[in-house]
Image (tube, coloured by chain):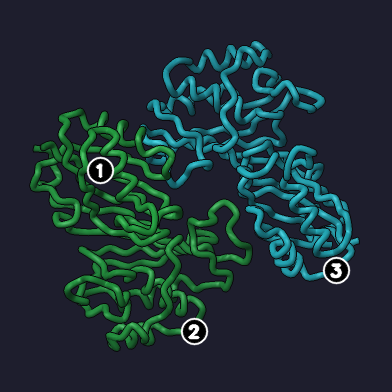
Chain colours: A green, B cyan
Amino acid sequence: MPRYKLLIEYDGGPFVGWQRQANGLSVQEALETAVNRYCQVDAVVHAAGRTDAGVHALGQVAHVDIPRDDPPDRVRDALNFHLRPHPVAVVTAEAVDDRFHARFSARERSYVYRILNRRAAPALEAGRVWWVAAALDAEAMHAAAQELVGHHDFTTFRARECQAQSPVKTLDEISVTRHGEEIRLFCRARSFLHHQVRNMMGTLRLVGEGKWTAADVAAALAARDRAAGGPTAPPQGLYFLRVEYPASEDAAP
Amino acid sequence: MPRYKLLIEYDGGPFVGWQRQANGLSVQEALETAVNRYCQVDAVVHAAGRTDAGVHALGQVAHVDIPRDDPPDRVRDALNFHLRPHPVAVVTAEAVDDRFHARFSARERSYVYRILNRRAAPALEAGRVWWVAAALDAEAMHAAAQELVGHHDFTTFRARECQAQSPVKTLDEISVTRHGEEIRLFCRARSFLHHQVRNMMGTLRLVGEGKWTAADVAAALAARDRAAGGPTAPPQGLYFLRVEYPASEDAAP
């Protein structure tokens, strides 16, 4: 059966998250319903990352096997037609080899977290940013964030519900930059623990406010204890940005 | 009575426009209601530009006289408190001389218009961009837009309802640039006619699609006839970006 790789954008606000759940509509269910309307089959849509309720995606990647050998652009357009009115868009579709797996083939994932740092609440960006009224020092946040780079036990930044086999991960890059009233955290790794980015963000906010130092962040990481970390930042500032695959598995057959 | 200059951001979506109207909530009414709750007076809030229903603002400027000599930051915070839950934010407030008038002192206004140019409808930017699925040539649009720069009779791009005394305006700058999937039109003038930016945008879209040439745009302008121009672009892609004032009238007393 032809396999298609989908690049997907969504507004996480109205969804219970990526994964199918009994208590509400998930992005996965919205997509699988669109596939069913298009092809009259119950196909599973596999994603590179299972985002939480309220978390957005600019570049989620998924794959699905469908019993139609349509040109990829027609697959994209048909899924978008059947996705309406949900805020989910298939930006591109691509025919791929059946060895391609959106989750298991992924070799790098990146996220961005947006803070609106000003006294006034967001008007245009409501639901799209974390509003922090207290002035934050982005340079101090960036410096402290470097304590997290590398191969570590990230238990301090791991949600209790996390299903990963090991809390040891390699964080390849993390940066915090200011763009006017906005502060952006970017991070990149092969994979992340559940809530890892939001927990790192909530901790770095303490640095931005001057309540914590870079040494406090290093000590929290070394403690390997969730209670040693800062609070979990809210979902609406987080965007699943991009997934990288090895060139060979990314190509069409 | 102290006069305050307000820098205002809003999501135009839920409003009937800037100006008070009987048929729904305007941004002006939302602000005047907030002033009333704060100071118990019925004050008029004067804006630099009267945006239409659905048009957003990143940098609208207004002024208001209130019977309280509060520090400007307190004025800003109090208005924001009373504006909730409307998507209107007073980004800054500043004490100004009573010769300052948000509308009449303005010497330059700028707008940006955002097009999302891709096959998939917007998921995260719904209501924030004009979605145009057909591929547009931004360079051709930019070149054609230069026909509009300068001192002209802009009747071709003027709404029937426009209340300006003269259709003659000077367009100081207009540019069209591509940023990935997004095309942005930026324009700058002392003042604009009603619907001028949206009518120029709708016309330049025809150029982007290859249906019109730069010479067609020049001919449409020369015709001084609204029927000679392209259609009116929808409001949700338009942002009132910035207002400039002479330095002397901009300062606090």
In the rendered image, the quadrant that contains the C terminus of chain A is top left
Count of marks placed on residues: 3
Disc 3: host chain? B
Q: Is residue A85 above or below residue B251?
A: above
Give the side of residue B135 with respect to residue B59, left or right.
left
Front: mark 1 or 3: 1
Depth check: B167 or A218 in front?
A: A218
Residue found at x 12% / y 38%:
A252
Hey, which quadrant is residue B119 in on the image?
A: top left
Q: Is residue A187 above or below residue B245?
A: below
Residue contact at pointers 2 and 1, CB within 8 angstroms:
no
Sort mark 3 into few (<14), some (14-19) or many (20+) by Cα contacts within 10 Å.
few
Reading the image, the residue beneath label 3 is B69
Disc 2: host chain? A
Image disc number at residue A211: 2
Q: CA–CA distance between discs 1 and 3?
A: 58 Å
Give the side of residue A195 with respect to residue B42, left or right.
left
Depth check: A120 or A33 in front?
A: A33
Reading the image, the residue beneath label 1 is A6
Give the x, y percent position of residue A207.
Answer: 45, 79
Residue found at x 41% / y 77%:
A203
Disc 1: host chain? A
Residue found at x 82% / y 25%:
B165
Q: Which amino acid does the dot numbered 1 rest on?
A: Leu
Q: CA–CA distance between discs 2 and 3?
A: 34 Å
Give the x, y percent position of residue B104.
Answer: 81, 42
Sort mark 1 into few (<14), some (14-19) or many (20+) by Cα contacts within 10 Å.
many
Determine the residue located farthest toward the right in the rendered image. Answer: B1
